[in-house]
């Protein structure tokens, strides 16, 4: 892939022919996806389109067909732990934190686990003490990166939903991901914090050799954050491209609206997720 500045971008992650079935029903039907270094890739689609199933296939949680290749290495048959150690790190729609631990402690645990794996079993005792000190520093840096250093000492159970999302993002960052998978990372945040987090994420990814896959229902977040977008419907990719290319595509409009974009203007400016009363405006 060639970036907007004319440089060739290396493919970090690819999914080829991704297929997952549950009780004979295909949740994914031959999905192809590629994510490149320094790129944020959005995955959108109506409810039930297969977004979570695709992420579960990449993470090794869902069993299925096709190939998931990370930096040239096929991960077929590899378990979720192995994939995490290889650099595939994800957050969840509902943050999974230790409620009685502080924000800093939650992030520090992730940092310790990451550094322990990197150090190996034969690390000397002196190295272990240095590693604990380093993990605490990494946790502080990550919380500062997501704008939550002032809440480092707060218990997770006392934090708002948006703050918990940021703690989980910080916990992912300390693991130095090669592929960062985010599921609605700014949901529940005030507007200013949302914009700051999106800007931080773009700076982090665009200035690195990592890639990010972003699942999101808020089209304004997708528009602001993503370099490219994959649109899923009924387990298949119906469109891939930039925001301008996907948001004006007739097949995409039909998937969300159940109608052509050449209808009344007030309807054409709105995406409605299937089987949901939630409506998300398409920013112009």
Image (spheres, rainbow, N blue to C red):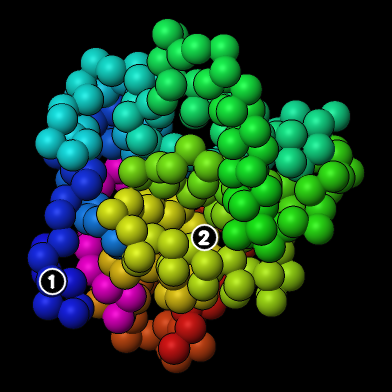
Q: Which corner quadrant holds the C terminus?
A: bottom left
Picture disc at residue 32: none
Spot occupied by residue 193 in the image (x, y as percentages of width and height): 68, 70
Q: Specify few, some or many for label 2: CA neighbours under 10 Å numbering under 14, 14-19, or 20 or more.
A: many
Residue lying at the far front of the rendered structure: 126
Which residue position holds label 1? 7
Q: Nearer the viewer, residue 79 or 233?
A: 79
Which residue position holds label 2? 217
Q: Nearer the viewer, residue 212 or 276?
A: 212
Q: Nearer the viewer, residue 140 or 166?
A: 140
Residue at image position (63%, 28%) is 132
Q: Nearer the viewer, residue 132 or 284?
A: 132
Residue at image position (60%, 74%) is 195
Secondary structure of the residue carrying tag 2 is: loop
Mark 2 or mark 1, which has the lower sequence index? 1
Position of residue 38 in the picture relative to residue 68 (left or right): right
Contact, CB < 8 Å: mark 2 with mark 1?
no
Spot occupied by residue 214 in the image (x, y as percentages of width and height): 43, 55
Q: Relative to 122, does residue 201 appear above or below in the rendering?
A: below
Asked if residue 281 is among those painted magenta in the image, a careful observer would answer: no
The residues colored magenta run 233-244
Q: Is residue 110 visible?
A: no
Of tags 2 and 1, which is closer to the observer?
A: 1
Spot occupied by residue 2 in the image (x, y as percentages of width and height): 11, 69
Secondary structure of the residue carrying tag 1 is: loop
Q: Relative to 263, does residue 30 appear above or below in the rendering?
A: above
């Amino acid at each position: 892939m060639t970036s907007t500045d004319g440089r060739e971008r290396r493919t970090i992650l690819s999914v080829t022919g991704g297929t997952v079935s549950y009780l004979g029903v295909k949740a994914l039907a031959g999905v192809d996806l590629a994510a490149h270094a320094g790129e944020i890739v959005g995955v959108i689609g109506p409810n039930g389109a297969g977004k979570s199933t695709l992420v579960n296939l990449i993470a090794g949680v869902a069993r299925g067909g096709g190939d998931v290749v990370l930096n040239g290495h096929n991960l077929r048959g590899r378990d979720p732990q192995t994939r995490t150690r290889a650099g595939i790190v994800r957050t969840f729609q509902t943050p999974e934190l230790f409620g009685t631990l502080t924000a800093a402690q939650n992030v520090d645990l992730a940092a310790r686990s990451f550094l322990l794996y990197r150090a190996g079993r034969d690390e000397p005792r002196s190295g272990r003490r240095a590693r604990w000190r380093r993990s605490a520093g990494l946790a502080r840096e990550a919380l500062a990166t997501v704008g939550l250093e002032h809440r480092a000492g707060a218990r997770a159970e006392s934090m708002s939903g948006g703050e918990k999302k940021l703690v989980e993002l910080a916990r992912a960052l300390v693991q130095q991901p090669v592929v960062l998978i985010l599921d609605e990372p700014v949901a529940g945040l005030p507007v200013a914090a949302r914009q700051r987090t999106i800007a931080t994420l773009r700076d982090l990814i665009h200035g690195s050799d990592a890639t990010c896959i972003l699942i999101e229902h808020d089209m304004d977040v997708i528009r602001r954050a993503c370099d490219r977008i994959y649109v899923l419907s009924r387990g298949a990719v119906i469109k891939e491209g930039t925001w301008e290319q996907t948001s004006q595509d007739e097949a995409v409009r039909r998937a969300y609206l159940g109608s052509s974009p050449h209808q009344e203007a007030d309807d054409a400016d709105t995406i409605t997720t299937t089987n949901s009363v939630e409506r998300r405006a398409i920013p112009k």
